[in-house]
Image (spheres, rainbow, N blue to C red):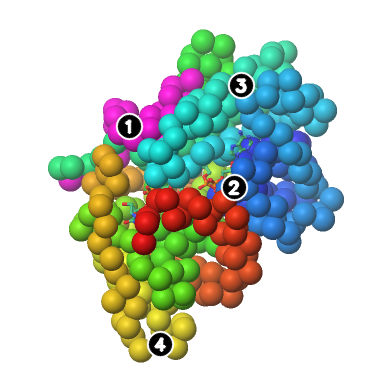
Amino acid sequence: MKCILVTGGAGFIGSHVVRLLVTKYPDATIVNMDNLTYAGNLENLRDVASQPNYRFVKADICDYTQVKKILTDFAITGIIHLAAESHVDRSITDPFIFARTNVIGTLTLLQAAKEHWKNDMDSSLFYHVSTDEVYGSLENGGFFVETTPYDPKSPYSASKAASDHFVRAFHNTYKLPVIISNCSNNYGPYQFPEKLIPLFINNIRHNRPLPVYGKGENVRDWLFVEDHARAIDVIFHHGRIGDTYNIGGFNEWKNIDLIRLIIKVTDRLLERPEGVSEKLITFITDRAGHDLRYAIDSTKLKTELGWTPSLQFEEGLEKTVKWYLSNQAWLDNVTSGDYQKYYEEMYKL
Ligand code: NAD
Ligand code: DAU
């Protein structure tokens, strides 16, 4: 692959994918296409922005003309598609933007890729980055495997499921070479602090309430973001066309247990008495339709492509807490402006 387009490269996971590809493949050009929504931040890529094989283009994935022009101008041979609206709570408040970006945006990219590659499908690849949430909620034990039937339950997961279906439909109908991966919850540096882990680290630092939905009994399966980026690289280069791969670290945590661990690590790094911030825990009204449990079985990825997570969770969490505590300016920057309004309306705390 000579010229790879990464969509959503200024976001959380996208920035780690871009950093990995720019550094690992100096002979390939990595084009980051992002329209810089509230979740997109070029600061996330400051360390690689001046590399000769990196380009940034501000563009909307829903704009067919612009997408087609980028594919042509850069002679794109591979697309790694991450651009999306990604926060479940926002999808509950405003589902329409999720349908626009995640469904129409993906369809626009697929159609543009199909036209761009119509004479050379064989040496191209459309890699779609999706989520484990498309499988629904595990209420009775077990794991999500690649053949688990889709059963999305939030407007976010419904929009991601719809986009996955369009990707498979383009493979089946037009023979577009595609691969899909479905990953569990990511954590690590540069995650927008509306998501559980960075939100709670920031609130602990500022002695603000920690808003726990319901009783904190929901379970999530956490993976360090750099391990997700490594998995994407492996699948993009070695995955089977038309196939699906689940990505996860077999690392389930009940929210309340995870929150207690975040408090313990953050208090220690802030040199506060251990556990003093537990008093900030505030149980609030549950998220509407809150999925009980996600758990990914990533055996296929390990067996077929040899990927395994590189970090133990305790190590990854420590790295993550340290990063947020040392990057308060980044947090202040992304939480200024509109985010304050969102926070007040969302939590009323
Ligand atoms: P994010 O919200 O941090 O970043 C999304 C990026 O997409 C931002 O840079 C934003 O500016 C860009 N974007 C949004 N709308 C766009 C548009 N119309 N045109 C161009 N760019 C646009 O998201 P994330 O958490 O990094 O997730 C990236 C992808 O991975 C998403 O597709 C998400 O569904 C998937 N995913 C996320 C997780 C997770 O835990 N965060 C887990 C599994 C899968
Ligand atoms: O599973 C993969 C998905 O993980 C991705 O597809 C999504 O893009 C990503 O946002 C994430 O979704 P979740 O809803 O699981 O992540 P979030 O960080 O929002 O919440 C994690 C858990 O913590 C969830 O059970 C809800 C709970 N929570 C979250 C917030 C923000 C709280 O109790 N309080 C909060 O304030």
Label 2 vs 1, first from the N-terminus? 2
* 335 shown above or below 178: below
CB under 8 Å between callouts 2 and 1?
no
- Disc number placed over residue 152 in the picture, else none: 1
Q: Nearer the viewer, mark 3 or mark 2?
A: 2
Question: Which element carries disc 4, helix, strand or loop?
Answer: loop
Q: Is residue 154 magenta?
A: yes
Label 4 vs 2, first from the N-terminus? 2
Quadrant position of the N terminus in the picture: top right
Q: Which residue type does callout 2 highlight? A: Tyr
- Looking at the rendering, the quadrant in which ligand 1 lies is top right
Q: Is residue 135 magenta?
A: no
* 96 shown above or below 310: above
Q: Which residue type does callout 1 highlight? A: Pro
Q: Quadrant of residue 314?
A: bottom left
**In the displayed structure, does residue 199 sit left or right of residue 106?**
left
- Give the CA distance from mark 4 to mark 1: 41 Å
- What residue is shown with label 4? 272
Question: Which element carries disc 2, helix, strand or loop?
Answer: loop
Q: Which residues are magenta?
A: 141-166
Q: Residue at x 70, y 52 (%)?
A: 42
Label 3 vs 4, first from the N-terminus? 3
| Number of other residues with Cα within 10 Å of mark 3, as a class: few under 14, some 14 to 19, many 20 or more | some
| Number of other residues with Cα within 10 Å of mark 2, as a class: few under 14, some 14 to 19, many 20 or more | some
Q: Which residue type does callout 4 highlight? A: Arg
CB under 8 Å between callouts 4 and 2?
no
Question: Which residue is nearer to you in this view: 9 or 307?
Answer: 9
Q: Nearer the viewer, mark 2 or mark 1?
A: 2
Label 3 vs 2, first from the N-terminus? 2
- Disc number placed over residue 38 in the picture, else none: 2
Question: Which element carries disc 3, helix, strand or loop?
Answer: helix
- What residue is shown with label 3? 108
